[in-house]
Image (cartoon, rainbow, N blue to C red):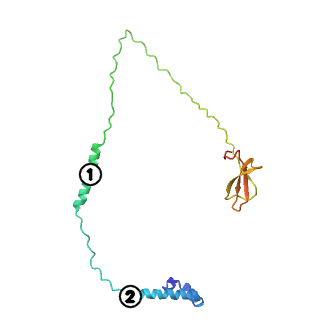
């Protein structure tokens, strides 16, 4: 209705809204109430005094560049002090002096180095037994989208089982379990 009152609708929509407002008393009353509010707001806005033209922007207090320089200097000094106090990493290096060669009467021929074949290491991975999976048995042909699992006892409470109840309260699926503790 606000777009209609501001004439912001396309011409075809303006005509349709005008025709509807003439026929519908509820919408016509709501439109008249909205139009009265618009007129009241326009009157109140018109009663406001004219604003003085802004000739110059208000000036902000100037900050001296010295405070900015002091802050930058303090940060730089903190970095230098932290660098100087940082512990230095040094590695202890021990130099060993080579043993003097043993005197030999005659030089023995040096045998060629032995060739080593790379070892093939085969790891035997034990085969894990597959876990036994107890599946639910569907009790009807409808798909199970949501449900609640309820533990029940069959055969006079001697055989524990889990039953899936659907949102309508009907049993949808069942599975037997080993005991009431929940182990399958």
Q: Label 2's element?
A: helix
Q: Position of residue 15 (x, y in %)?
A: 56, 88
What is the number of callouts on the image? 2
Identified at 43% across, 86% down, the residue is 41
Q: Position of residue 38 (x, y in %)?
A: 46, 86
Q: Which residue ends up furthest to the bottom in the rendered image?
A: 22
Q: Is residue 91 above or below residue 65?
A: above
Q: Which residue is at the front of the view, 80 or 33?
A: 33
Q: Nearer the viewer, mark 1 or mark 2?
A: 2
Q: CA distance from mark 1 to mark 2?
A: 59 Å
Residue to which mark 2 is pinned: 46
Q: Which residue is at the front of the view, 44 or 114?
A: 44
Q: Which residue is at the front of the view, 155 or 96?
A: 155
Q: Which residue ends up furthest to the front in the rendered image?
A: 156
Q: Position of residue 85 (x, y in %)?
A: 28, 43
Q: Label 1's element?
A: helix
| Mark with earlier residue (1, 2) | 2
Q: Is residue 169 above or below residue 89?
A: below
The residue carrying pointer 1 sits among few (fewer than 14), some (14 to 19) or many (20 or more) residues within 10 Å by Cα, namely few
Q: Is residue 129 left or right of residue 79?
A: right
Marking on residue 48: none
Identified at 29% across, 45% down, the residue is 83
Q: Is residue 93 above or below residue 80?
A: above
Residue to which mark 1 is pinned: 76
The residue carrying pointer 2 sits among few (fewer than 14), some (14 to 19) or many (20 or more) residues within 10 Å by Cα, namely few
| Quadrant where the image shows the C terminus | top right
Q: Is residue 28 left or right of residue 111?
A: right
Q: Which residue ends up furthest to the top in the rendered image?
A: 105
Labels 1 & 2 near each other (Cβ < 8 A): no
Q: Which residue ends up furthest to the right in the rendered image?
A: 155
């Amino acid at each position: 209705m606000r777009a209609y009152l501001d004439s912001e609708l396309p011409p075809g929509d303006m005509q349709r809204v005008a025709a509807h407002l003439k026929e519908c008393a509820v919408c016509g009353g709501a439109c008249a109430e909205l139009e009265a509010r618009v007129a009241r707001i326009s009157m109140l806005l018109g009663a406001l005094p004219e604003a003085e033209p802004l000739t110059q922007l208000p000036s902000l207090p100037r900050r001296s560049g010295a405070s900015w320089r002091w802050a930058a200097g303090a940060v730089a000094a903190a970095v230098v002090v932290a660098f100087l106090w940082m512990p230095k990493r040094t590695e202890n290096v021990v130099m060993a002096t080579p043993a003097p060669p043993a005197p030999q009467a005659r030089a023995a021929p040096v045998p060629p180095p032995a060739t080593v074949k790379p070892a093939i290491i085969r790891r035997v991975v034990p085969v894990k037994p597959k876990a036994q999976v107890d599946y639910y048995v569907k009790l009807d042909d409808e798909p199970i989208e949501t449900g609640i699992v309820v533990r029940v006892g069959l055969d006079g409470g001697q055989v524990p089982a889990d039953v899936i109840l659907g949102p309508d309260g009907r049993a949808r699926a069942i599975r037997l379990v080993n005991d009431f503790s929940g182990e399958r």
